[in-house]
Amino acid sequence: MYQPKRIPSNQFVPIRNLKYHVLVWGDPAPGKVPLVMVHGWMDVAASYQFVVDAFAHDHYVIAPDWRGYGLTETPDTDNYWLPDYLADLDFLLDHYSPDAPVHLVGHSMGGNVAMQYAGSRPERVSKLVNLEGFGMAVTRPSMAPKRYAKWMDELKAFHRGEMELKPYGSVDGVASRLMKTNKRLGRDKADWLARQWAREDSDGKWRILGDAAHKITNAQLYRVDEVLEIYKAITAATLAVEASDDSLAQWWQGKFTLDDYHERLRSVPNVRIAKIEDAGHMLHHDQPEQLARLVEEFLASP
């Protein structure tokens, strides 16, 4: 099984009436900019362990489990909204770096949060790295009635217990599930990740550390015009990192493409695009050494 080289401390921080779990690698020091790394949908902060181990230098890394994930408390709610993640991140930075901007890295959903946060609070982000945080396909106002109806139907299904996450009979089952989803993930990393991604319950079942309510469709449409205005407000130098596998082609079948995403990125004042070879959407698992080198070179650049 994978053996981490850099061991984080486990911290619990009060954020908006929740006890937030945060992994912290390294120590604060004069001149050392905090590196805040936020994870994606149905993931956990420990997912960044491979990248942290691959860094050539010691960084002060702060990685939270989002609300309803990992060891962070699950709020008393039955659905989740993107603005809550922005506010949670804002409170997190108040705790760890109240007087100075941070470097911010986000993967997938976390990449979307990081981009929107950096445009909403530009003074708080020094450099920004977006790992496959593409956003969503264009929506039209005419979609709203069916979207709200779908949201309400899924809420009812959730309360009937029909959206529960599948339990696994053993930690090996969790590891196999991770490997099935990501063909590049080796058994050693999968065995280690499974123990961060799930916990054994009192009935002997291994359950994913994610609230099933995260599966419920967002009631509001994705408004690209608003997102582009936020992108325009980003002042941080931005690195948009993509995997060599085209996840958008797999997910959207032409409804939202890499060309569409690149066109949106043109609204970001200072951005460059980089690619990680031989990697899929979980590029921080597939090629942590490539990614660590790319991030460190970007952070060290003027």
Image (cartoon, rainbow, N blue to C red):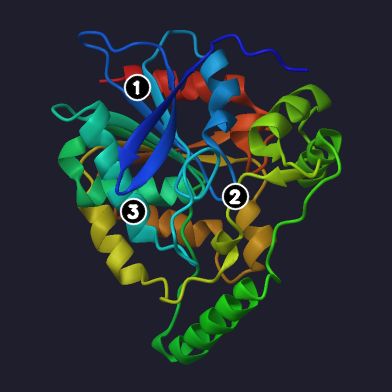
Disc 1 secondary structure class: helix
Could you say where residue 182 lies in the image, as x and y percent from the top left? 75, 41
Q: Nearer the viewer, mark 1 or mark 3?
A: 1
Label 2 vs label 3, nearer the camera: 2
Q: Quadrant of residue 20?
A: top left
Q: Disc 1 to disc 3, how far (Cα)?
A: 21 Å
Q: Amino acid at mark 3?
A: Arg
Answer left or right for 112 relative to 119: right
Instruction: Please tell me whether mark 2 or mark 1 is closer to you in this view.
Output: 2
Distance Cα–Cα, label 2 vs label 3: 34 Å
Packing grade of label 2 (10 A; few <14, some 14-19, many >=20) is: many
**Residue type marked 1:** Leu
Where is residue 289? Give x, y as percent: 59, 19
- Taking 103 as reference, is 72 above or below it? below
First of labels 2, 3 by sequence position: 2
- Residue highlighted by disc 2: 210
| Residue hosting label 1 | 299
Mark on residue 252?
none
As rendered, which of 281 and 202 lies closer to the eye? 202
Q: Quadrant of the C terminus?
A: top left
Residue under circle 3?
Answer: 266
Residue name at image x 50 percent, y 18 percent: 293
Residue drawn at (62%, 69%) of the image:
254
- Residue 287 placement, left or right of 256: right
- Camera-side residue of 201 and 139: 201
Image quadrant containing the N terminus:
top right
Asked if 253 appears above or below 279 in the picture, the reply is below
Residue 221 position within the rendered picture, expressed as x and y whole percent measured from the top left: 42, 76
Mark before the other along the chain sequence, 1 or 3: 3
